[in-house]
Amino acid sequence: MFYRPNIDDHGLPHNPFKAIVSPRPIGWISTVDASGVANLAPYSFFNAVTDNPPMVMFASTGVKPDQAYSKDSVANIRETGEFVVNIVSLKLKDQMNTSSGALAAGVDEFEHAGITKADCNIVKAPRVAASPAALECKLFKIIDLPGTNNVMVLGEVVGVHLDDTVIVNGIFDVTRYMPLARLGYKDYTAVTDIFALERPE
């Protein structure tokens, strides 16, 4: 089959786009608002974009009734210029899912989902204490994208937290925590099978 997005009716019960582009890592973004209230929300439009300097991006789509522009995470980053990317392990899937609810602005998702906070070294936002890794980020740029309230946030990583139990023989070993990833629809997966490939000369 072939269809043109936003032009043709694909005839399927659900939009297949996000199922096609999968698995997608989850950026569990923590921020604080100008008054210091924490926010935590998962975004599956997330990835690393460069490694020198290390930079990450996440995209927010849609709106909340109590935010004039985008969602709480983006609003907080606009105010403070900072955020944290917390990596989601399989063990944290239920807490991550709980934090994805559309709570009112000013509600602390850490407290709502029973998630323990840990202080960051550089940014003011807290990190998820149980995450295998957390990236402290300074805002580089917010880019408005086509469509209604589609926003991409680019940040430079200025601090990295690693759980020491995940470092094995000098390698950050993802098999120790099984990264959670988003598929399409309501589906998720966890990384369990790993193989290596040598690049051709």
Image (cartoon, grey):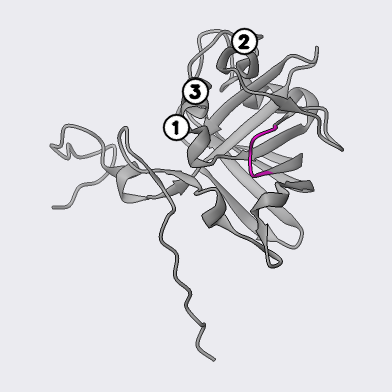
Comparing labels 1 and 2, the label whose residue is closer to the camera: 2
Residue 132 forms part of the magenta stretch: yes
Secondary element at tag 1:
loop
| Residue labelled with disc 2 | 105
Q: Is residue 68 above or below residue 20?
A: above
> Which of the labelled discs sits on residue 147, or is there none?
1
Q: Which residues are magenta?
A: 129-133
Residue at point 77%, 33% (across, down): 82
Q: Is residue 69 left or right of residue 190?
A: right
Front residue (pair 150, 114): 114
Residue 40 image-quadrant placement:
top right
Residue at point 70%, 36% (across, down): 84
The image position of residue 163, as x and y in percent, is 70, 47
Label 2: how many Cα within 10 Å (few below 14, some 14–19, many 20+): many
Secondary element at tag 3:
loop
Q: Amino acid at mark 2?
A: Ala
Secondary element at tag 2:
loop
Q: Amino acid at mark 3?
A: Ser
